[in-house]
Amino acid sequence: MIGQAIADGLLTGGILALGAIGYSLSSQILKFANFAHAEFLTVGAYLALALVTLMGAAEPIGALSFGLPLIVATILAGIGTGLVAIAVDRLVFSRLRSRRAAALTLVFASFGVALMLRNLVLLLWGPDAHYYGQELQIAIEVLPDVRLLPDHVFVLALTLILVVSLHLFLQSSRVGVAMRAMADSPALSQACGIDTASVIRWTWLLAGMLAACAGVFTGLTVQIRPELGFNMLLAVLTAAVLGGSGSLFGAVVGGLIVGLAESLSVLVMPASYK
């Protein structure tokens, strides 16, 4: 019982970690709490749904409930969500920054952006729940008394790969070094010749891509709804703050703690308090 709850908590925590990493990156570099970040999860999930529908049905891969189209759709949805995030910055936040708006003004603007994105999704896809596929799965025993669906195992493995890949990108690439420098001191970074505008674009792109992956993974484990991101907002922000703003592995640890707390709580209290 406890083992199964821990496994479910790790799955939830891994998804939350992806959202928390994107939020941490943007908050550390852009210096404000972006409450619209959770809506990028919804945008990514629905973009992938649209692309899967466009590509049509395909044979599932092994024991998974989906085929190659969803993998391709996730990659394209990640890029598309990143571009949406850049467009939002260009239309809203960059204009406020150019006017030297206070951080609190940017926070209030992010609430407006969140409402706009959520209602745009609602307008395009309606309020009903959607699924990436209708294939039935049989849970497999990964450890004694611990069973997971093949989709869940895939999500956990891919989440780990994404976190490690992002860490290597931030540590080894020129863009990653510039992002870390700007997170420490934007003024000093600009004085050293770093293209801060380019760093900001990369930040929005990566945050949007990670959010899209988290949205697709959530859709795989439960269902896709217009309020998907909104329902995860508090947990994502909690994971980011708990792990320390701007810390990649801190966000991972924060996400795992929140996910485990949610899953283990049902052992001692009603599930409605989860």
Image: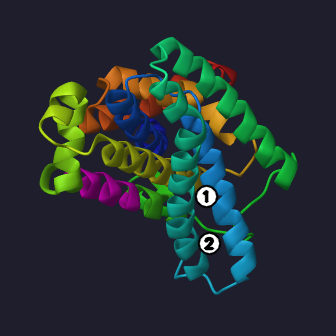
Q: In the displayed orientation, state which residue is furthest to the bottom.
A: 59
Does residue 247 appear left or right of residue 81 in this picture?
left
- Please state the extent of the stretch shown in magenta in the rendering: 157-167
Residue at horizontal 74 percent and vertical 78 percent from the top: 54
For residue 199, above or below residue 164:
above
**Residue designated by label 2:** 65
Alpha carbon of mark 2 to alpha carbon of mark 1: how far? 9 Å
Confirm whether the magenta stretch covers residue 158: yes
Give the numbered dot on residue 95.
none
Give the residue at mark 1: 220
**Residue 96 or residue 17, whichever sits in front:** 96
Identify residue type, mark 2. Answer: Ser
Q: Nearer the viewer, residue 89 or 253?
A: 89
**Mark 2 / mark 1, whichever is N-terminal:** 2
Task: Say few, some or many: other residues with alpha carbon within 10 Å of mark 1 (under 14 / 14 to 19 / 20 or more).
Answer: some
Q: Residue at x 64, y 19 (%)?
A: 273
**Residues at discs 2 and 1 in contact (Cβ within 8 Å):** yes
Mark 2 surroundings: few (<14), some (14-19) or many (≥20) residues within 10 A = some
Q: Which quadrant would residue 245 be assigned to in this image? A: top left
